[in-house]
Amino acid sequence: MAESKTKVTLVGTVMAKQGIEFIYEGEVAGCDTCKVKKACNNLQIGRKYRIVSVRTTHHECMVHLDSATAVEVIEAPITALINAEMAIVNSKIKLDLSCKKSDCRSYPLCEPDGVVDGEKYIVVSVLGNTSDICEKGRALKRVEIKPS
């Protein structure tokens, strides 16, 4: 998989470690008067990111304990279960996020965190078949996807 272009943002210093993944949830109330809030809030809400590099720049922060640190992030691939016939590398897909069976053991991968409803994704790799049986009767494959 080709690496995505990096973006510089700020995260809490405690969380600023290479390899950490997170879902960006948006600006919080404590950011209102901060002079660097644009640098912290420059990611897309609901997307999953991975820290690939930690910089030495730190800023005082009203929200994060022990300040905020500059990091470089990429959009992280998301592991998901999709219909087997859609599991083709480099194909664009739209996930069906209509399953309501939250007690199913496959649910976290059928409706993974970091997926934005209605957006298209690219299948970057097919990880294989799954032993999970879909209660809706679908044949599923485990894949890695990224926003298109």
Image: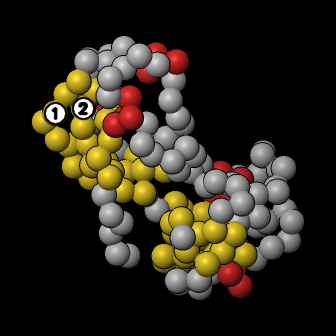
- Horizontal arrangement in the rendering, residue 68 relative to residue 75 (left or right): left
Quadrant containing the N terminus is bottom left
User: Would you identify the image quadrant in which residue 83 lies?
Assistant: bottom right
Mark linked to residue 69: 2
Q: At numbered mark 1, what does the secondary structure look like: helix, strand or loop?
A: strand
Residue shown at 60% from the left, 63% from the top: 80
Tag 1: residue type?
Thr
User: Would you identify the image quadrant in which residue 4 lies?
Assistant: bottom left
Up the image or down, 103 lies above or below 131; here it is: above
Up the image or down, 118 lies above or below 64; here it is: below
In this rendered view, identify the residue nearer to me: 64 or 145.
64
Mark linked to residue 57: 1
Position in image of residue 59 (x %, y %): 23, 24
For marks 2 and 1 on the same chain, the one whose residue lies earlier in the sequence: 1
Position in image of residue 139 (x %, y %): 75, 77
Residue shown at 76% from the left, 64% from the top: 96
In this rendered view, identify the residue nearer to me: 45 or 112.
45
Position in image of residue 61 (x %, y %): 32, 18
Q: Are marks 2 and 1 in contact (CB under 8 Å)?
A: yes
Mark 2–mark 1 distance (CA, rounded to whole Å): 6 Å
